[in-house]
């Protein structure tokens, strides 16, 4: 995915000269007051209709079963990842690790959960390998959940995650919706965000350091708001 500009820069002619005017962003309604407007726009942050987040039970990277309902009383940051992804998912992983470090300084004990979207990599060993490779073990509350394909498909449907599998250069490749759900301590969905990446000419995914830091800060700010 290629990020779109946060706002347009308008050229206005005045007395024969051209000046640049940057219009003020309209602040999205319903977002946490502690999240700056520019940051909310960067994250495509929006409130969700008030409803209980669909429940599920999966096995995490340690092979231990966990359920979403077991995290009641704590904010949950929920996303969807391909454990064999080498583009956007590693970037989101770094955002989550940095966000947890930010939250640890304020003693906000958010839970970070990812659901597997790769039908060809369902094993616990696969999500464990991804967790280790991207240093997600540094997040004490990290759970990378996997299960049967039928179970995962049901979860994808409940959270409106589109998953498509293609063969690219003789190998399976997964294309999926990239969404982050913020779930309140009472188990209700509260906010939704959409990560993105930039690409080099060769197709390598990256995110500028300032944007990576901003995303991590944004995740931390929303989680902190849910805890207050």
Image (cartoon, rainbow, N blue to C red):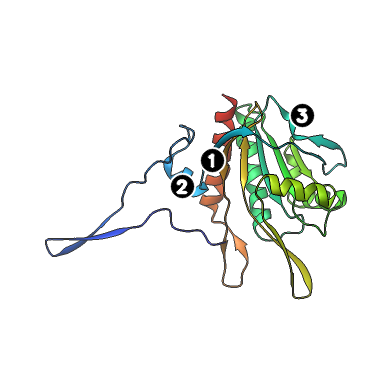
Residue 88, percent across and down? Answer: 64, 57
Q: Give SS at disc 1.
A: helix
The residue furthest bottom is 169
Residue 85, percent across and down? Answer: 72, 59
Q: What crowding class fits label 3: few (fewer than 14 Cα within 10 Å), some (14-19), or many (20 or more)?
A: few
Q: Which mark is residue 218?
A: 1
Q: Give SS at disc 3.
A: helix
Q: Is residue 105 above or below residue 132?
A: above
In-front residue for pair 121/34: 121
Q: Is 205 positioned to the left or the right of 43 in the image?
A: right
Mark 3 or mark 2: whose residue is earlier in sequence: 2
Determine the CA span between mark 3 and mark 1.
25 Å
In-front residue for pair 63/181: 181
Q: Which residue is mark 3?
A: 70
Labels 3 and 2 touching (C-beta < 8 A): no
Residue 93, percent across and down? Answer: 67, 49
Q: Which mark is residue 41?
A: 2
Mark 1 or mark 2: whose residue is earlier in sequence: 2
Q: Is 41 positioned to the left or the right of 61 in the image?
A: left
Residue 210, percent across and down? Answer: 51, 50
Residue found 36% across the figure and 57% down from its top = 8
Q: What crowding class fits label 2: few (fewer than 14 Cα within 10 Å), some (14-19), or many (20 or more)?
A: some
Quadrant housing the C terminus? top right
Mark 3 or mark 1: whose residue is earlier in sequence: 3
Quadrant housing the N terminus? bottom right
């Amino acid at each position: 995915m290629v990020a779109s500009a946060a706002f347009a820069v308008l050229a206005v002619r005045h007395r024969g000269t051209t000046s640049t005017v940057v219009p003020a962003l309209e602040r999205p309604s319903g977002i946490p007051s502690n999240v700056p407007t520019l940051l909310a726009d960067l994250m495509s942050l929006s409130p969700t209709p008030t409803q209980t987040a669909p429940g599920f039970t999966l096995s995490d990277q340690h092979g231990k079963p966990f359920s979403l309902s077991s995290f009641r009383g704590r904010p949950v940051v929920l996303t969807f990842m391909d454990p064999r992804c080498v583009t956007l998912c590693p970037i989101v992983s770094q955002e989550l690790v940095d966000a947890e470090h930010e939250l640890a300084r304020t003693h906000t004990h958010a839970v970070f959960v990812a659901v597997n979207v790769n039908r060809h990599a369902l094993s616990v060993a696969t999500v464990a390998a991804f967790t280790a490779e991207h240093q997600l073990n540094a997040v004490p509350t990290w759970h990378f959940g996997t299960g049967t394909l039928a179970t995962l498909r049901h979860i994808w449907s409940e959270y409106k995650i589109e998953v498509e599998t293609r063969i690219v250069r003789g190998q399976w490749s997964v294309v999926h919706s990239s969404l982050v759900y913020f779930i309140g301590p009472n188990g209700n969905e509260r906010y939704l965000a959409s990560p993105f990446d930039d690409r080099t000419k060769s197709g390598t995914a990256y995110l500028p350091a300032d944007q990576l830091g901003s995303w991590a800060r944004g995740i931390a700010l929303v989680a902190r708001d849910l805890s207050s």
